[in-house]
Image (spheres, coloured by chain):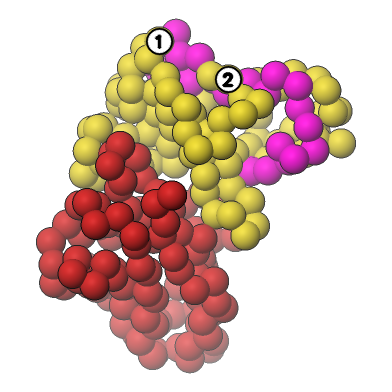
Amino acid sequence: DAGITQSPRHKVTETGTPVTLRCHQTENHRYMYWYRQDPGHGLRLIHYSYGVKDTDKGEVSDGYSVSRSKTEDFLLTLESATSSQTSVYFCAISETEGNNYGYTFGSGTRLTVV
Amino acid sequence: QKEVEQNSGPLSVPEGAIASLNCTYSDRGSQSFFWYRQYSGKSPELIMFIYSNGDKEDGRFTAQLNKASQYVSLLIRDSQPSDSATYLCAVNNAGNMLTFGGGTRLMVKP
């Protein structure tokens, strides 16, 4: 996972609290993505970014917001955590819009909402 | 809803055998196809990509693409226990995002 770091690696939080996950890259890639991975659902796109302050929704964006104020950082916020948001969250980066070379993933954040 | 389908497995093969992993996709406009390997508790790792119909080989791995049939496969020759993992197929969609299949769990038995 050289060049892309997620923090925290593990987090337990209570229902109703806000939570922010951080993705930091040193590759200077323009495109960044947040996915969640759940058994039976695979990887699902939450939000993505195609540049500083340019973000858009993915297929499972409800209850999540993102911000990208610098090229290297992409933050995912759960506004009011629910048990259904218990999941493993992966950040990914890509160099080109056309995904010619695929994505590189971070190590993931395991989030448990109790 | 654009879909990428994989058999969840587990696919069990003996050490040294060929493992064949399959993926079908619904978006005829897809142009780029990827195979990722994911070990338990780890992040997905890109192992192959293919853009053109036919075969692409890289070491023990061969990716096969048939756009007419909307089918992409991954062959692993001389399978090793270290190949035991979940293999994810990914396809780019009209918005140039990658859509992932649910993955196939491969078990290589010594």
Residue A54 is drawn in which quadrant? Answer: top left
Q: Are marks 2 and 1 in contact (CB under 8 Å)?
A: no
* Image colour assigned to chain A: yellow
Chain under disc 1 = A
Give me the chain that's red: B
Which of A10 and B30 lies nearest the eye of the viewer? B30
Residue A64 is drawn in which quadrant? Answer: top right
Q: Is residue B42 magenta?
A: no
On the image, numbered disc 2 is attached to which residue?
A65
- B17 left or right of A6? left
Q: Is residue A72 magenta?
A: yes
Chain under disc 2 = A
Neighbourhood count class around disc 2 (C-alpha, 10 Å): few under 14, some 14–19, many 20 upward: some
Instruction: Give the distance between the C-alpha atoms of the residues marked 2 and 1, in whole angstroms.
Output: 12 Å
The answer to whether one can see residue B83 in this image is: yes
Q: Earlier in the sequence, mark 2 or mark 1?
A: 1
Quarter of the image where the N terminus of chain A is located: top left
Residue shown at 76% from the left, 21% from the top: A80
The spot of residue B11 in percent (x, y) is 51, 81
The spot of residue A19 in percent (x, y) is 71, 22
Disc 1 element: loop
Residue shown at 75% from the left, 40% from the top: A84
Q: Amino acid under label 2? A: Ser
Q: Is residue B45 above or below residue B62?
A: above
The spot of residue A52 in percent (x, y) is 37, 12
Q: Amino acid under label 1? A: Lys
The label on residue A106 is none
- B51 left or right of A72? left
On the image, numbered disc 1 is attached to which residue?
A53
The span picked out in magenta is A67-88
